[in-house]
Amino acid sequence: MSAVLVYIDFPAGSDASPDAAGTGTPTAGLSKMSMELLTLARVVGEPIVAASGPLSEEVRTALGSHGVQQIFQCEQSELREYLVAPKADFLAQVAARISPAAVLLDNSAEGKEIAARLGVALSAGVVTDAIGLDRALLAEKAVLAGSYLVKARATTSVAVITVKANSVTPEQAAHATAPAVETVKVSFGPASLGTRIVERTARPISGRPDLSEARIVVAGGRGVNGDFTPVEELADALGAAVGASRAATDAGWIEHSAQVGQTGKTVSPQLYISAGISGAIQQKAGMQTSTLIVAVNKDADSPVFEIADLGIVGDLFSVLPQATAEIKRRRS
Amino acid sequence: MELAAPSGAGSGAAALNIVVLVKHVPDTQLNRRLGEGNTLDRAESILSELDEYPLEAALQLAEARGGEAGGNMVTAVTMGPAAAVAAVKKALQIGAYQGVHLSDQALAGSDAAASSLALAALIRHLGPVDLVLTGLTSTDGETSLVPAQLAARLELPQVTFASSLEVISEGDSHKAVARRDGDTYADVVEAVLPAVVSVTDQINHPRYPNFKGIMAAKKKIIKTLSLADIGVAGEDVGTAGSWTVVESAAVRPPRTAGTIITDEGHAGIQLVEFLADHQLL
């Protein structure tokens, strides 16, 4: 069976600040994204893990329950101190050792960049934004803002694939393993230590699910007119992530990382509630692959109503709070 | 016509030689289609909106150092079929000083790996540069792979997803300081130039071409180069040189409008009923 290398970036709970370099902070549990990658890896072959930092006992056990045979880890501080390139060097070195059929990474901005460099280092084709993967390493992905579904494949001996969150339901392996752990000493490329991280600030933790991974997203646009409260309250009642249109993030009403759309995040939750967003192409590109779309907008001519499963012509400042109250009433 | 080299001697020591990558992409406001061989139908293309940000960043950096007269150079570079020169022309109207168009039939169908190979050879051909600036992604391929691959191929530092960019110069030595906003961290990163820098749409507010700019652009130089000119073999790029292939493509059925109601005082409750009907509560 061919090996599939799965990359796990400093997992949740690890202190990835540059000044904590090399302290070997043990990590908390395995992220859902990592479990999804491992589940997909087992479709293709035998999962082997490359981790950018030392792993806790808990994570090693979790990896074992996902059938991981071997873990390669790097403890060198360069992976924390410099941008992207050292991580790609580490992965390239592990890949050269084990000759995997594929390398799987998460589809975050950094995941794609590591994949990009790894592709050059291994002369391997890179497929990004995969939402499915079969035994023959044919990856499914949406292109042109979700208007097409294509099947793409690397034509090289190793494929590098970045996978979007929620592409597969994580499942444990039929047989647990006790993975061997090897610490790798990486030699870095000439320009890999070119971009130093001189300051790192952790973003405030909202307590809400991650926008890219959330099952439900409630998003606000121009219509919220500076006040995201009704959007946030409905999101919290539903356990949802908060999103925004570009108009709302450009106006500074909410942080840029909440932007859904062509120049922001592409989400495909089970439910997307759009409030006060007209639904122009910029926004549509980021959310039209959602399973269900509910739109609330005062303007009956808003393009968002053309793609909504339920469209409500009305004022979000009365519709959303009423919905929030009703959800709370039903649950109490 | 020959390209101007930035005038080193006699210019300000802090002058920068900047290459901005611009791409000619199908207009995202229109319906975009995959054509023959599952490659993109490139009719009705424009300068990628996201490439206006690196161009603006380049112009601001150059202007702060005395502009063209101060020995700075801002070269807009594209690769693609004959029509792609329109992206360079637009960049010149906005303010780039000169343009380069890598045009060759053999480039058709290039994936990120092939594109970054051609662009790396092209940039090497143009001679020493201080900065290669790009947008955060192309609005057609949307992979964000090219800036990182270009940096890897050129063996230059990679400063990507910059939402702010400053260049600090000491004599002939320049250092880029950029802010990179990730989902979990906001980083400040530093790299000694030359470097490849990709910038987001948060970095600035791109200027529009004005009448003066449009008239001035007519006199600016656009150099057209072929693969042979830059020493790249045709089979290393295009479909032949790509490392990925799209095997099949299917149009997703367009979404259709569902039920539309007008709030008569209880739409919030109707919304919750809809969620309950779909087991979303």
Image: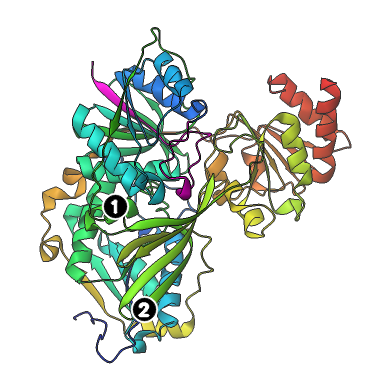
- The Cα atoms of the two marked residues, 2 and 1, are separated by 23 Å
What is the three-letter code of the residue carrying label 1? Ser
Identify which residue is drawn at 42% across, 76% down.
Answer: B61
Residue A318 is situated, as x and y percent measured from the top left of the image, at 85, 42
Badge 1 is on which residue? A192
**Residue B227 drawn in magenta:** no
Check the image and report above or below for B123 versus A291: below
Q: Which one is in front, A188 or A254?
A: A188
Which type of secondary structure does the marked residue at label 1 adopt?
A: loop
Asked whether residue A99 appears in the rendered view, the answer is: no
**Residue A22 drawn in magenta:** yes
What is the three-letter code of the residue carrying label 2? Glu
Residue B20 is situated, as x and y percent measured from the top left of the image, at 34, 67
Quadrant where the image shows the C terminus of chain B: top right
Extreme residue in the top direction: A175
Horizontally, is A278 left or right of A67 in the view? Answer: right
- Look at the magenta stretch and give its main secondary structure: loop
Q: Which label is found at residue A27?
A: none
Badge 2 is on which residue? B170
Which type of secondary structure does the marked residue at label 2 adopt?
A: strand
Chain assignment, label 2? B
Chain assignment, label 1? A
Tag 2: Cα neighbours inside 10 Å, few (<14), some, or many (≥20)? few
Check the image and report above or below for B173 versus B151: below
Extreme residue in the right direction: B265
Where does the magenta region start and end?
A: A1-26
